[in-house]
Every structure is written in structure tokens, then in C-alpha cells.
């Protein structure tokens, strides 16, 4: 994978993180996702973006796995890619609390790592 392709994927991931954070603003608990139609739409939209982030990272890892290892170990990236697998193949098992926890606790760290990757291009 050439640097342009990696750059495009990194840009997509950062854009997705921005959209997730924007959509997450009115969510203050996992129950907010389930409270009404708007909450459910936010849950679906955020879940789709998380899935897409995992797919982008999976593509980078397949073609240029050492690139990701410059900022975090294999276990870190594997957890994110595995989340993508769960969202894709076991969506019915995903609950609002899991998505809430990811958004509330994990996105800033991921964004920092992706920004660090971007600086290495």
C-alpha cells in the first residue's frame, strides 16, 4: 500500500472520529441511545463509523502492519479490528452500553494515535 492510500485511510479515520464525537455530544448515558428514534439513529450511525474505522485499520494492517506498530502494539490494534468484526458479524449482540463506553472512554486515545500515525507519513 502506498503512502497516498495510507494517507487517505488515515484521513477517513480522523473524519469518522470527528463525526462520532459530534454525534455523541447529546448522549450522556447508554440509555440516551435507546430513549427515542433520534438516539437509535445516533447509535446506528456511530456503530457504522466504528465499523468503518476498524475496516480501515484492518486494511492498513494487511498491507503495512509495521506502520501501525510505530505508535501502539499489535494487541491495541487487534482489539479495534476485532470490534469491527463484532459490529459486522454480530451486530445483534452489540448493546448501547458497549458503544457508549467506546465513545466515552476510547476515542480520544485512538484519535491521538491516529494523529501520531499521520505525522509519520
Image: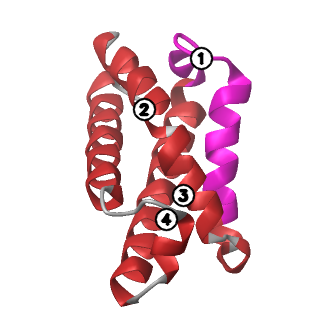
The Cα–Cα distance between marks 2 and 4, rounded to whole angstroms, is 16 Å
Question: Which one is closest to the eye, mark 3 or mark 4?
Answer: 3
The location of residue 83, given as percent across then percent down, is 65, 52
Helix, strand or loop at mark 4: helix
Question: Which one is closest to the eye, mark 1 or mark 2?
Answer: 2
Say few, some or many: other residues with alpha carbon within 10 Å of mark 1 (under 14 / 14 to 19 / 20 or more).
some
Mark 1 lies on residue: 72
Whichever of labels 2 and 3 marks the residue nearer the N terminus, that label is 3
Specify the label residue 108 is tagged with. 2
Q: Residue at x 42, y 63 (%)?
A: 46
Helix, strand or loop at mark 1: loop
87 vs 99, nearest the viewer:
99
Say few, some or many: other residues with alpha carbon within 10 Å of mark 4 (under 14 / 14 to 19 / 20 or more).
many
With respect to residue 23, does 16 lie above or below? above
Q: What stretch is highlighted in magenta?
A: 65-86
18 vs 118, nearest the viewer:
18
Say few, some or many: other residues with alpha carbon within 10 Å of mark 3 (under 14 / 14 to 19 / 20 or more).
many
The Cα–Cα distance between marks 2 and 3, rounded to whole angstroms, is 13 Å
95 vs 91, nearest the viewer:
95
With respect to residue 13, does 33 lie above or below? below
Specify the label residue 100 is tagged with. 3
Helix, strand or loop at mark 3: helix
Which quarter of the image is occupied by the C terminus? top left
With respect to residue 24, does 41 lie above or below? below
The Cα–Cα distance between marks 3 and 1, rounded to whole angstroms, is 23 Å
Q: Disc 4, disc 1: CB below 8 Å?
A: no
Question: Which one is closest to the eye, mark 4 or mark 1?
Answer: 4
Mark 4 lies on residue: 47
The location of residue 119, given as percent across then percent down, is 29, 12
Whichever of labels 1 and 2 marks the residue nearer the N terminus, that label is 1
Helix, strand or loop at mark 2: helix
Amino acid at each position: 500500500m502506498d503512502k497516498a492510500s495510507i494517507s487517505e485511510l488515515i484521513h477517513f479515520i480522523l473524519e469518522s472520529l470527528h463525526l462520532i464525537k459530534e454525534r455523541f455530544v447529546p448522549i450522556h448515558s447508554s440509555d440516551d441511545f435507546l430513549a427515542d428514534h433520534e438516539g437509535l439513529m445516533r447509535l446506528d450511525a456511530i456503530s457504522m463509523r466504528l465499523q468503518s474505522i476498524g475496516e480501515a485499520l484492518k486494511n492498513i494492517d494487511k498491507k503495512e502492519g509495521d506502520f501501525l506498530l510505530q505508535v501502539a502494539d499489535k494487541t491495541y490494534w487487534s482489539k479495534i479490528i476485532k470490534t469491527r468484526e463484532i459490529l459486522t458479524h454480530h451486530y445483534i449482540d452489540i448493546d448501547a452500553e458497549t458503544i457508549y463506553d467506546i465513545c466515552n472512554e476510547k476515542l480520544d486515545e485512538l484519535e491521538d494515535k491516529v494523529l501520531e500515525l499521520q505525522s509519520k507519513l
